[in-house]
Image (cartoon, rainbow, N blue to C red):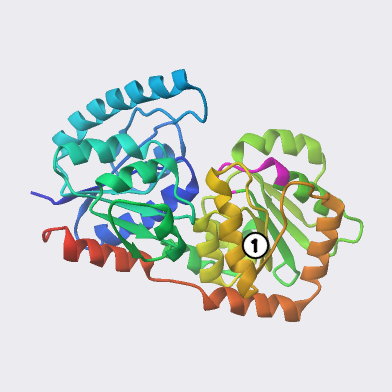
Amino acid sequence: MPVKVLLAGGGTGGHVYPALAMGDALRARGYELLYYGDAGRLEGRVAPERGYPFRPVQAVAFPRAGILGKIRFFFGLLRAVALARTQVKADAPALVLGVGGYVMAPTVLAAWTLGIPCVIHEANVSPGLANRLCARVSKLVLLTYDETRRRLSGAEMVTVGCPVNPKILKGDRTKAAERYDLDPSRSTLLVVGGSLGAATLNSLAITCARDPERRYQLLHICGPRYYDELKKSYGELPEGVVLVGYEDRMGDAYALADLVVCRAGSSTLAELAALGKPALLVPSPNVTDNHQEHNARGLEQVGAAAVVLEKGMEMPKVAAQLRGLLNDEGNLKKMSIAAKSIAKLDVAEQVAQLLVDRFLPAP
């Protein structure tokens, strides 16, 4: 009989891609992996594409306010756990590895009721609500940042970092430039709003594209839901500008980039560090406990990134700042060295070995 491990959680690339990196490391050791998540969100598309059998999970998001909403949530969670319990029991895994997102909770709680050991990974400084809840029933919590220890209670905690997909590291600048029909010898700015896109970063990208003093190329990955709108907004694309809706080969985009403008999810920051990419970070204000700003300040403190807050952001001023950064090769090199100094390249392998040593029988 194969030894099965369930990956649970998702919603955004910051949850999904670290999960798949850890899952790939376990698959390479001979374990059978399955993915439990929301069929309508990122994991529902990406996990099957990567060869993971997918189990859709019914889940309810925790309401931010209102007693009636919280009561409905409680009963909705009980129902979701009961449904997940039936599927988990049928799959009979040796371990459940949760990665955050509200869709994770029913699977982890169902596994706990069945006596199946659970481990969760927290990617950010400030843990999300699902991880706060599930930490209390988990055997182990894997942390990206030591600072998170004081924000969680329950299980034993080990700081490991955030897993990075090794494919990210294998991009080739010349081939990437050919793919995007850009010049590999010119400076290139990459603007990317994560797997879902970000309206503020899209507005900044348009401002940069139309900057009359721009001499660099711009690769703008806008997010699939914004693509049609932005295509109309751009009209005819300015010289040296490429618009992409969604990029599933981020290694190419990073390989071409001399500077990256992005949000500050932990998974993205781990990729920037691994690649030594200088960045201007615009933390999302729409996250639990403002955790993206906490994440971003870590890179800023070591000199790997500049941070601009969304509130009160002046687009022309930031566009000028980006132009100045791209014109300063010496500073970009210093930022690159600083980013690489905090990189952790073998997190997925370390996690897989830890799970094998402590929880998993031989496959």
- The answer to whether residue 182 is seen in the rendering is no
Quick one: quadrant of the C terminus?
Answer: bottom left
> Is 3 left, or right, of 109 in this rendering?
left
> Is 282 left, or right, of 290 in this rendering?
right
What percent of the width, then of the height, locates residue 203?
A: 77, 44
Q: Which residue sits at x=62%, y=53%?
A: 263
**What residue is shown with label 1?**
178
Q: In which quarter of the image is residue 113?
A: top left
Could you say whether the residue bearing mark 1 is in a helix, strand or loop? helix
What percent of the width, then of the height, locates residue 90?
A: 14, 34
Q: Does 323 appear above or below 98? A: below
> Is 346 left, or right, of 155 in this rendering?
right
- The answer to whether residue 241 is seen in the rendering is yes
Q: Which residue sits at x=58%, y=66%?
A: 298
* 14 in the magenta segment: no
Q: Which residue sits at x=37%, y=29%?
A: 59
Q: Quadrant of residue 294?
A: bottom right
Along the line of sight, the residue nearer the viewer: 141 or 49: 141
Along the line of sight, the residue nearer the viewer: 298 or 177: 298
Q: Main secondary structure of the magenta part?
A: loop
> Is 130 left, or right, of 278 in this rendering?
left
* 198 in the magenta segment: yes
Boundaries of the magenta span: 194-200
Q: What residue type is labelled 1?
A: Glu
Q: How many labels does the image show?
A: 1
Q: Does 65 appear above or below 191? A: above
What percent of the width, then of the height, locates residue 75?
A: 33, 21
What percent of the width, then of the height, locates residue 295?
A: 56, 59
